[in-house]
Amino acid sequence: MLQCGEWLCKFDRGITEFAVSQMQVTLRKATADDAAAAWEIRNAAIRHACKGFYADDLLSLWTVGEMTDEFVEFVLQQLHVATVNGVVVGTGTINLGDGRLDAIFVRPDMMGRGIGKRIIAFLVDLGRSAGLTELKLDSTLNAAPFYRRCGFVGDAIGVYRSPRGISLDCIPMSKWIAPPVHDGQPLQQTGPP
């Protein structure tokens, strides 16, 4: 049972009660073993956080079906995960060629606990290390305030075309990031780290 005065929270999937201030969050490259959890987190986050911003039938289309081999390959090639006590609780990607962030999802029971901000900071660090100076993303309508709190800007409504061929209203956003520095001087990056 959640006892807010004691700053405790309880999670399913084998995470027992622990003090929020002692939460051990690890960010790492995803493995094939993370694919099923990433698929479940994606669908749960969309159904939970996007409800009321998109039509129910569109949310159903966006999240219907089983995990595909293509999704597993995507996880292996591009996805990073956030874990708490070894359990995957969030995901995110960055394209180090063009600075595009995508697939930033957090388990609904972990939303509002700083996991999403940690994922963004991790991806920003990866981009900065690769010599990028600008990051871009297409925000769902509900997530734009979160991204603004993380330093992204953008207000115009655009259209996101999902890999499944679904078109969704979105807010294209960007964020300028400083290049990495050493002894007060920007580092010259010659390629990916």
Image (cartoon, rainbow, N blue to C red):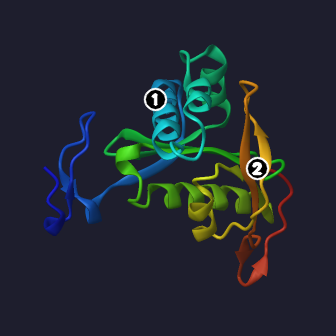
In the rendering, at what x and y percent does residue 190 appear? 86, 57
Residue under the image location 76 percent in, 62 percent down: 174
Q: Is mark 1 on a helix, strand or loop?
A: helix
Residue 110: assigned label: none
Q: Is residue 174 left or right of residue 17?
A: right
In the rendering, at what x and y percent does residue 61 appear? 61, 24
From this view, report whether residue 144 is shown above or below residue 187: above
Q: What residue type is labelled 1?
A: Glu
In the rendering, at what x and y percent does residue 89 appear? 41, 43
Q: What element carries label 2?
A: loop
From this view, report whether residue 62 is shown above or below residue 136: above
Q: Residue furthest bottom?
A: 184
Do residues under tags 1 and 2 come within 8 Å of each other at their CB atoms?
Answer: no
Neighbour class for label 1 at 10 Å: few (<14), some, many (≥20)? some
Q: For this rendering, which residue is in front, 12 or 78?
A: 12
Q: What residue would you read off at disc 2?
A: 100
Residue under the image location 61 percent in, 38 percent down: 79
Q: How far apart are marks 1 and 2 (CA)?
A: 23 Å
On the image, which quarter does residue 23 sit in?
bottom left
In the rendering, at what x and y percent does residue 21 appear? 28, 66
Neighbour class for label 2 at 10 Å: few (<14), some, many (≥20)? some
Frontmost of labels 1 and 2 is: 1
From this view, report whether residue 130 is shown above or below residue 11: below
Q: Which amino acid does label 2 sit on?
A: Arg
Query: Mark 1 or mark 2: which comes first in sequence?
Result: 1
Q: For this rendering, which residue is in front, 39 or 167?
A: 167
Residue under the image location 79 percent in, 44 percent down: 159
Residue under the image location 41 percent in, 53 percent down: 111
Q: What residue would you read off at disc 1?
A: 40
